[in-house]
Every structure is written in C-alpha cells, then in structure tokens.
Image: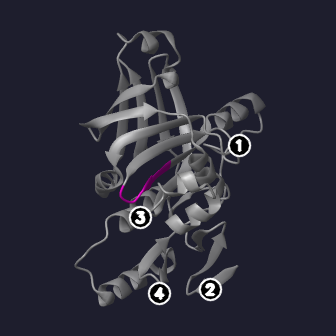
C-alpha cells in the first residue's frame, strides 16, 4: 500500500509508516528528528505546522486523521564501514563483521530500551538493556547534536570481573557526562521480539509504531494491557570497537560509511 505525498511515497509496511525520500540525508539528522515525535510543542498552531512541513519537505508526512507528524527516512542498505577492499578479503570481512544493527526504542511516556543485533533480520537481540532514563529526557539530550552514553561497571563485582564485558547485568549510566541513572540487562519478552519483527525491513531511520498496531500484532491479552502508548524508535548501523576486555564501544555510521562519533555508546569496566 502506498500514498503519494509531495516529495515522497508513504509506505505502510507491517503497520510502520515510512517516507521514502529522494534527498540524501545523513544518519545523524535522522536521530535528531526523533525529537519532533517525543517533545511536542503545546504552543505551535496549525500555521506553524504547515510552515514546518514546507521546510522539511519530503521528510515529513502529515497525518490529518490524528493531527501529528509521522517521520521516517530510510537510506539505502549499507553494511560496510568503509568501501570494500578487493585486494585483501580478510580485512574487508573483518570490517563488515564489526557492524551491528542498533535500535533505541521506547514508549512515549516510558523508558528507553537499547538493543544490538548482529543479524538485523532476526528478532532475537545480541544485547538488550533497559535504561532508567525516560524517553523524553533522552530526546532533549539530542538537541545539542552530540549524544554520548557511557555505561560503567565496577571490577569489584564478582560477576563483572569474571565474565565477558557485555554480559554484565547492571550498569551505571552517564549521558553526555552526567550521571542519569542505571541500565539493566534483560531477557527479551514476546513484546520485544514482536517490536523487532515489525522493524525487520527498516535499515536506518526513526519512526513511530502506534499502540493499536502493537496490540494487534502481539495478540496476547496479558501483554496488551501494558501497551497503551505509541512506540518511538531509532534504528541504524553501528561500528563495534573492542578496545580491551575492559572497554567496548558502538559508534553510529553515517550514510556515506564514515564514523563521526556524534552518537556513541561506551561500555567501560573500572
């Protein structure tokens, strides 16, 4: 199903609204755009919305039924950090294997989840963390154009010192240098897997999955009662860098394959 709206085509894929844009847009601009979902302005009127729509062009699809913007940009699939190296197959393969699909998602009035997948077509994540920071607070941190999340664990913990770094269950969380709470590793629920399944065809972008779509997709009454809100998500490719047994990091990859470290997530054992 598709509907033409000015500069792009709106595709409805498994209940996820998306706009296939013709303009080249960097991945970081996708990240900052999520603020328009999460932090609505109570002072904007219809004329302001129309002006914003003209400024954003094909980036926004205005839904007249519920008077809100549904935003999504999907660049072409790119799994390589740098251009393929034909003279050295081993090096090229290593670089590609260090790319993970990262998804930051959370309900509008809830907390944030951080997920990494080695296989984006699978609904089973390699790592899933529940962050104590509310979705709205994280969105505000994006306004400066730089987002760095540091997750720290202590070597005095018996589990921390004897296991792989990413297997640590509890972390202290810092956002742009400020302590904002904690992060806890958890087993994905059926709802988590359904959410990741809905985003299976999304390579890169930000968007909204409304609560009704989620309830219809999951189909479990016991889970449905907890899903009363729209879900916001950011999905992109991240370069994974393993510094040592005490440090790993994930850095958002721009559409051109470069790594500007404007969005970075660090795991540190102190």
Q: Residues within 10 Å of mark 4 (few under 14, many from 20)?
A: few
Cα distance between the residues tagged 4 and 3: 20 Å
* Closer to the eye: label 1 or 2: 2
Residue drawn at x 77%, y 39% as measured from the top left: 86
Cα distance between the residues tagged 1 and 4: 44 Å
Residue 139 x/y as whole percent: 34, 56
Residue under label 4: 64
Q: Which of the numbered marks, if any, corresponds to residue 4?
A: 2
Q: Which of the numbered marks, if any, corresponds to residue 27?
A: none
Helix, strand, or loop for circle 4? Answer: loop
Cα distance between the residues tagged 4 and 2: 14 Å
- The first of marks 1 and 3 along the sequence is 3
- The first of marks 4 and 3 along the sequence is 3
Helix, strand, or loop for circle 2? Answer: strand
Q: Quadrant of residue 36?
A: bottom left
Residue drawn at x 36%, y 53% as measured from the top left: 135
| Above or below 64: residue 249 | above
Q: Residues within 10 Å of mark 3 (few under 14, many from 20)?
A: many
Residue under label 1: 84
The span shown in magenta is: 104-109
Quarter the C terminus occupies: top left
Q: Quadrant of residue 182?
A: top left
* Closer to the eye: label 1 or 4: 4
Looking at the image, do the residues carrying marks 1 and 4 touch, with CB atoms under 8 Å apart? no
Residue under label 3: 33
- The first of marks 4 and 2 along the sequence is 2
């Amino acid at each position: 199903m598709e509907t033409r709206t000015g500069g792009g085509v709106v595709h409805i894929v498994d209940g996820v609204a998306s706009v296939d844009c013709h303009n080249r847009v960097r991945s970081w601009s996708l990240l900052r755009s999520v603020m328009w979902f999460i932090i609505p302005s109570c002072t904007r009127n219809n004329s302001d919305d129309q002006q914003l729509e003209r400024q954003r062009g094909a980036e926004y699809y205005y839904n007249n039924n519920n008077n809100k913007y549904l935003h999504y940009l999907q660049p072409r699939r790119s799994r390589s950090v740098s251009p393929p190296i034909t003279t050295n197959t081993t090096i090229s393969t290593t670089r590609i294997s260090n790319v993970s699909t990262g998804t930051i998602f959370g309900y509008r009035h809830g907390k944030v989840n951080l997920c990494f997948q080695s296989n984006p077509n699978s609904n089973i994540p390699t790592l899933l963390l529940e962050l104590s920071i509310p979705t709205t607070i994280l969105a505000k941190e994006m306004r400066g154009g730089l987002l760095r999340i540091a997750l720290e664990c202590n070597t005095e913990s018996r589990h921390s010192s004897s296991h792989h770094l990413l297997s640590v269950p509890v972390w202290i969380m810092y956002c742009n240098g400020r302590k904002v709470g904690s992060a806890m590793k958890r087993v994905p629920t059926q709802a988590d897997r359904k959410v990741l399944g809905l985003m299976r065809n999304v390579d890169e972008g930000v968007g909204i999955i409304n609560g009704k779509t989620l309830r219809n997709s999951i189909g479990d009454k016991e889970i449905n009662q907890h899903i009363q809100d729209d879900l916001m998500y950011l999905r992109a490719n991240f370069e994974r860098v393993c510094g040592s047994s005490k440090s790993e990091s994930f850095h958002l990859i721009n559409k051109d394959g470069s790594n500007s470290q404007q969005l970075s997530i660090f795991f540190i054992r102190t």
